[in-house]
């Protein structure tokens, strides 16, 4: 809590997103992408202000953030060729001065990069997962894994399918079949050429190698979380890494439902009662530092002994979760109010 604020005053948060000077001047709680979050925060007695950020007026934003109790950040780390270096330094600084930051850059690094798939591979949501720190390690170890079946290669930081590949060993050939998640058709490449394509991924991170999940064509369930509670679900038939044109044609938009959706109650219980506690303990994240909104994507895995589906984690998104289910803002607001009352 900020020391200048009296104990009786309402807690205040800033909702930070990117924009230019005009956007900063004109932003109000009743315009823009986060109207529903402003409303929900107001309903639980939290004062909320828009905070439009750009590197060119970072000092004004810093001043603003030092005057609130918390900041909810919605900034994609790799949008429009920009990065978050300046913003993250600013957020670290205001957090060190007592402002609650959701999500803190350290929490994003722990939860929001693909490394989480490796670090949590022993959890029940984990699959056969490896991590390569260098292109040489990938060159040396990938063939053995490919011999056992198709793999998915993912750069540590990415979204929208960038840096995600399905890789298969072609039978009776030294060549690989590789499919870029942003493309429709696979191509054939020699291992060395594929490793060269991935070389840049190692410049600022590692590469994750996960077993390809053959039930991908049944769709992906996205579980939205506000702190440690489920805030709803999204389900959709995907296109990325689906090869057959028939299956690709079934792809559709993500359909959102509330956390009460009967189809996903087992997943909800697993996320709230087992996996989130395990995740924060493994990654050493305090419960109160869990982001106000984050999501975890699941593919279906093998059917278990009791006949139920298993779920395989595909990724966790932390830094710019939007859109989200209609019910999520209320859940976000509850978590924020709880966090700031402590
Ligand atoms: N292990 C996997 N098995 C099968 N398909 C996968 C696997 N991992 C990812 N995919 C497919 O690739 C897409 C992109 O991967 P994802 O991990 O979500 O990365 P991002 O969204 O950051 O690009 C997923 O939506 C899914 O269609
Ligand atoms: Mg994804």
Image: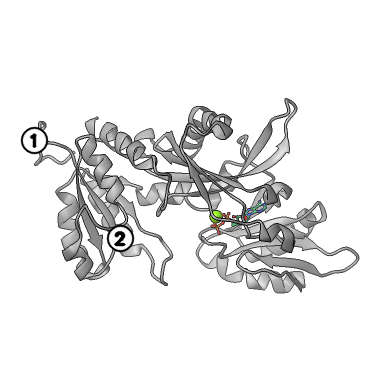
Badge 2: few (under 14), some or many (20 or more) residues near its Cα, within 10 Å?
Answer: many
Q: Quadrant of residue 47?
A: top left
What residue is rendered at 53% in x and 62% in y?
160
Q: Which mark is residue 272?
A: none
Say which residue label 1 marks.
Answer: 6
Badge 1: few (under 14), some or many (20 or more) residues near its Cα, within 10 Å?
Answer: few
Say which residue label 2 marks.
Answer: 87
Provide the secondary structure element on which disc 1 rests: loop
Towards the viewer: 39 or 99? 39
- The answer to whether residue 171 is visible is yes
Q: x, y percentage for residue 193?
A: 71, 74
Q: x, y percentage for residue 339?
A: 28, 34
What residue is rendered at 19% in x and 35% in y?
45
Provide the secondary structure element on which disc 2 rests: helix
Q: Is residue 182 left or right of residue 15?
A: right
Is tag 2's residue or tag 1's residue first in the polypeptide sequence?
Answer: 1
Q: x, y percentage for residue 321?
A: 42, 51
265 in relation to 234, above or below: above
Ligand 1 within 8 Å of the CB at mark 2: no
Towards the viewer: 107 or 311? 311
Q: Is residue 163 left or right of residue 55?
A: right
Q: Is residue 272 left or right of residue 212?
A: left
């Amino acid at each position: 809590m900020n020391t200048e604020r009296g104990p009786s005053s309402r807690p205040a948060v800033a909702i930070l997103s990117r924009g230019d000077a005009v956007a900063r001047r004109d932003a109000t709680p009743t315009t823009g992408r986060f109207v529903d979050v402003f409303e929900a925060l107001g309903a639980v007695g939290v004062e909320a202000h828009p905070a439009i950020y750009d590197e060119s007026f970072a000092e004004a934003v810093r001043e603003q953030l030092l005057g609130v109790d918390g900041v909810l950040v919605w900034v994609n780390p790799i949008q429009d060729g920009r990065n978050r270096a300046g913003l993250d330094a600013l957020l670290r600084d205001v957090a060190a001065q007592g402002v609650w930051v959701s999500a803190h850059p350290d929490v994003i690094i722990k939860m929001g990069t693909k490394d989480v798939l490796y670090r949590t591979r022993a959890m029940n949501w984990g699959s056969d997962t490896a991590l390569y720190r260098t292109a040489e390690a990938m060159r040396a170890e990938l063939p053995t894994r490919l011999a056992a079946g198709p793999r998915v290669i993912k750069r540590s930081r990415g979204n929208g399918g960038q840096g995600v590949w399905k890789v298969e060993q072609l039978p009776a050939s030294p060549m690989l079949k590789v499919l870029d998640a942003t493309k429709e058709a696979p191509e054939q490449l020699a291992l060395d050429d594929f490793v060269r394509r991935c070389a840049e991924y190692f410049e600022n991170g590692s590469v994750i190698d996960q077993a390809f999940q053959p039930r991908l064509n049944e769709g992906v369930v996205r579980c939205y979380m506000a702190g440690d509670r489920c805030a709803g679900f999204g389900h959709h038939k995907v296109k990325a890494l689906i090869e057959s044109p028939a299956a690709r044609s079934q792809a559709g938009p993500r359909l959102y439902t509330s956390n009460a959706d009967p189809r996903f109650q087992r997943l909800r219980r697993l996320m709230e009662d087992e996996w989130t506690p395990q995740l924060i303990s493994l990654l050493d994240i305090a419960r109160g530092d869990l982001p106000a909104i984050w999501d975890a994507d699941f593919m279906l895995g093998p059917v278990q002994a009791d006949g139920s589906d298993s779920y395989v984690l595909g990724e966790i998104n932390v830094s710019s979760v939007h859109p989200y289910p209609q019910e999520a803002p209320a859940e976000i607001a509850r978590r924020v109010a709880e966090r700031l009352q402590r």
